Image: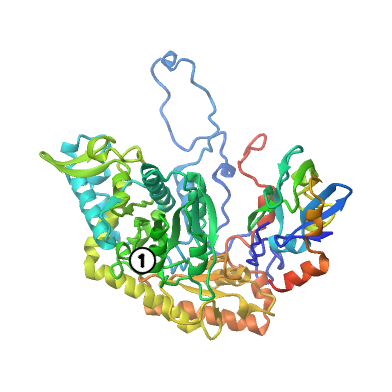
Amino acid sequence: MTMQNIGRPTRPEGAAESTGFTSLTGGRGLLQDEPLIFELGGWTKTGVDLPAASGDAADLAGLTRAGVDLPGLSEPEAVRHYVRLSQKNHAIDLALYPLGSCTMKHNPRLNEKAARLPGFADLHPLAPVATAQGALQLMDRLAHWLKTLTGMPAVALTPKAGAHGELCGLLCIKAAHEAAGQGHRRTVLVPTSAHGTNPATAAFVGYSVQEIAQTEDGRVDLADLEAKLGPDVAAIMVTNPNTCGLFERDVIEIARLTHAAGAYFYCDGANFNAIVGRVRPGDLGVDAMHINLHKTFSTPHGGGGPGAGPVVLSEALAPFAPAPWVVSGPDGLDLVEEAAADAAQAFGRMSAFQGQMGMFVRAYAYMRSHGADGLRQVAEDAVLNANYIKARLSDVMTPAFPDGPCMHEALFDDAWLDGTGITTLDFAKAMIDEGFHPMTMYFPLVVHGAMLIEPTETESKRELDRFCEALRALAATAKLGDVERFKGAPHLAPMRRLDETLAARKPKLVWKRESGGA
Amino acid sequence: MRFTKDHEWVVLEGDVATIGITAHAAEQLGDVVFVETPEPGKVVKAGDAFAVVESVKAASDVYAPISGEVIEGNTVLGDAPETVNADPENGGWFAKVRVSDPSQYDALMDRPAYEAFLATQ
């Protein structure tokens, strides 16, 4: 079996209950415990005063029934239920959200305002193009910005998220190989530090995946890459900066070796925020790269809604881009929808319609409000903030790659916890008690007990200092042997430590109404 | 009992090999929550992925340490995957294989060699 020696515990070891004050009702001050909406019940009542049904019930062809098994809550009950749930959630609007490899930056309200303009928000995807010229123009300009920022000649806007973009990129690569009589290439090379979506995408397309080893300093091992490149390799998938928060300094050589072997270079653009405006992936020899509009250009995690993962393509892959795309015609802008004529080699489509219009508007608003100089500063400040955290914590925690600066995220391992009896998971849970969302844990897999911190550029020095002070205080406590604080954490969250093993072995996936109901 | 670098163990009795994952592997995986064992009749080659083990934190293929034909999968693991943690090198066996080339067994590591290998990891 393949060993994953990441050291993550999966069931609580600490005391089940914190000592100290507990309320009589189980609530925590004004933060009340909240059951499922179905458990709130009200099965025999309705919270809304509906008029009696009128008209001929026969029109419903016997579809009428008395009970529909919905909880009968009044409006205030329903409102309170959802507001209470929202209070248990953590959001970027509440505090720093330092998830590495997620780019949880502030979401400017201007973008939201633009995305809600009725001309964009209410536009039907099947509206005649003559009535959608404004939307098409926005898509065209967004495409222009993405191509300019990446130095790539083409972009497919339709993929709906990062992994969907990976799929789009690999399908372009597959189509290009088949068109060149190279369809026999069956292998995709992926570094050991890759996002899990990379090998998953390659497998989904039907490729077999081979891992490329990593050097001591966290980069792609060129000798191993060269040894594994061969006539069977279709592509490599490399993230740059990589998931260790490090720039692949040999990226030009990686591209050269890849192309010399007849393979394509897919770049995972999840970490584009670190280099936007500073480095053009096209200049590095990249053939395809997805851009998470919902990270790099705000709306972290899609703002709770959809994401968007457009893919920029090199000259070699551009002819295979999926439809549709925007072109200029005699009557203004138009959409190329069919794989014919100039688009004869398009591999198909990734989306029924034109992609996530709302995300296009948000990303474009973000780009235009920052400007080219502002985007460059985004990357610079993101890297500066990460290095500030690395510098402020390196004397109490152990950086996984101490030599040299990091890019947009600072990566620590758990060597500094050796002998304390405290794990990365315990430490992360204790952060919740201090009012901070944990960083990404146990990823990348190549670093034992990894703690990956990405502050993004939108955090102020004051907030970064608050965060660093909290982590320094926790680290000092851990080294003094206050194990119970960590093993029992979180003490103050609405839910205590969950038993992941029990949840995986005996999952409760659906709610079932108990006989009688409430 | 012999061992692989991929943390499988094998016991050979006559021409039947019993195969599982080592105590070290089970400990590193953490709580095992799912095991898929191979169907009888499946022909496997040494190095083939022939079973799947999943813990809360990782899913992993288990590789056949030795070539042959599967004669039995450990069906107990379907309902009680925790057996792999409780008794990895005995009751938590994954499959029995009728081996085609017993000499492959002798090429595997014995326990001192495996423990020496672990010390280098």
**Residue under the image location 76 percent in, 72 percent down:** B116
In terms of depth relative to the viewer, which is nearer, A156 or A471?
A: A156
Vertical relation: A161 (above or below) A253: above
The residue that label 1 is drawn on is A273
In terms of depth relative to the viewer, which is nearer, A265 or B14?
A: B14
Vertical relation: A170 (above or below) A278: above
In terms of depth relative to the viewer, which is nearer, A230 or A364?
A: A230
* Mark 1 closeness class: few <14, some 14–19, many ≥20 residues within 10 Å: many
Task: Specify the quadrant of the image occupied by residue B30.
Answer: bottom right
Image location (x, y in percent) of residue B13 = 89, 50
On screen, residue A154 versus residue A21, left or right, reads left
Query: Image quadrant for the N terminus of chain A?
Result: bottom right
Image location (x, y in percent) of residue A213 = 54, 66
Which chain letter matches label 1? A
Q: Is residue B112 visible?
A: yes
Image location (x, y in percent) of residue A114 = 24, 53
**Residue under the image location 57 percent in, 40 percent down:** A41
